Amino acid sequence: MTQIKVPSLGESVSEATVAQWLKKEGDAVKADEPIVELETDKVTLEVNAPEDGVITSITIGEGEDVEVGTILGEIEAGAAANDASSSDKSDNKDEKAAAAKQDEKKEEKADSGKDQSDKLSPAVRKLVDENDIDPSDIKGTGKDGRLTKGDVQDYLETQKSAPASKSSKPAAPKEPRDLGPREERVKMTRLRQKIAEKLKEAQDTAAMLTTFNEVDMTAVMEARKTYQDGFVKKHGVKLGFMSFFTKACVNALKEFPAVNAEIDGTDIIYKNYYDISMAVSTPQGLVVPVIKDCDSKSMAQIEKDIIDVGTRARDGQLAIDELSGGTFTITNGGIFGSLNSTPIINTPQSAILGMHKIQQRPMVMPDGSIEARPMMYLALSYDHRIIDGKEAVSFLVRVKDALEDPQRLILEV
């Protein structure tokens, strides 16, 4: 038999949930064929068959949590599909035998506890009962292994000195409320739980503040219109808004390094690289893949990378390392129609830029005339512990200036 195990899930990821079995017991599989999907707090990944054979047992069901190395099931190498049923029967017998042995062990332990309880002196029995202790949990040092009062007192002192998280009993979980006739209960996915945890963590730990500005998108829209055909012909990808914003942010991050830094205890870690996280909405929830080294990439390459990670994010095909290590985040709520918002920092980063819907608004021009211009509100949420208000406002102004005069992106001014 070959065991199907939970593979390494990547740095900082130790648990997953069995999302879906793609095969069932008795199914023949080929080596490297996907057989089960696992959902982590970052991505959904597939576990492939280690070799040709038949799945003889599935030990972990859908919806159950597992750790790296957990045995999910077994494959009988080279077995024919019609042998699966007999193998299953054999496994069932083994499982029943194992269960019977387990029951016997439980009974033996209970009997042992009862025998030990019968041998307790009145003083020891009183101490055990008052503190609700199972005598079998304590090693006796008296004659024939009997418990002494000192044994129980030492045990109690050990429990008191242990960390509270280990010695104290966990609070009873809140009872789920009764559902109404038109309600249904669905367990949060591991990804959704992680999103909730990180967002709450950001609000609890960062001194979060948001500053706003607006940008006239005329120049960017004209540049796209003028060069779109040639850009597509040469690079095979459309010139979008995101590459302009990415380049504008990178230039501003170079000028204001605190916006690209993070807090580590009482230290500030300044990052001399520019790996930009891009928020992507997927059917499973929000993920934030990272486009690395944006300072050294062309706008065409940035557009290609954004399309690539966005597509794979929605298909659940991102690797773990593509979701970690970003230095600054850009999120575009405008694609859903958002006019303005206050984005939440993507910890441990210190700032996030929110893009919004482009909307024609009347603007007073330098000569006093009024024109309808394509305007977008920008929002920069930042950690005030590390970024001062002046830096945050100046950063956002640099982004605005670069977008309203895209030549600045070439000159890096």
Image (cartoon, grey):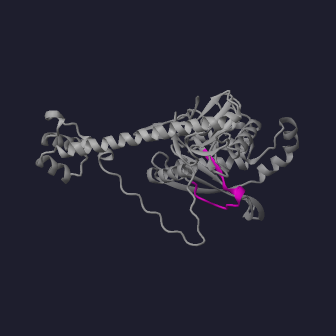
The N terminus, quarter of image: top right
Which of the 4 image quadrants contains residue 27?
Answer: top right
| Range covered by the magenta-colored residues | 329-343
Q: Is residue 394 left or right of residue 407?
A: left
Q: Is residue 37 left or right of residue 305?
A: left
Q: Position of residue 295 (x, y in %)?
A: 66, 34
The answer to whether any part of residue 96 appears in the image is yes
Q: Is residue 51 left or right of residue 63?
A: right
Q: Is residue 108 left or right of residue 209?
A: left
Residue 95 within the segment the image draws in magenta? no
Q: Position of residue 54 (x, y in %)?
A: 66, 33
Q: Position of residue 51 (x, y in %)?
A: 66, 27
Residue 303, above or below 127: above
* Foreground of the two, 227 or 240: 240
* Foreground of the two, 285 or 233: 285
Residue at screen point 44% across, 53% down: 204
* Foreground of the two, 23 or 112: 112
The answer to whether any part of residue 254 appears in the image is no
* Foreground of the two, 391 or 76: 76
Residue at screen point 46% across, 37% down: 98
Which of the 4 image quadrants contains residue 255?
Answer: top right
Q: Position of residue 158 (x, y in %)?
A: 22, 40
Total label count? 0
The C terminus, quarter of image: top right
Which of the 4 image quadrants contains residue 77?
Answer: top right
Residue 330 within the segment the image draws in magenta? yes
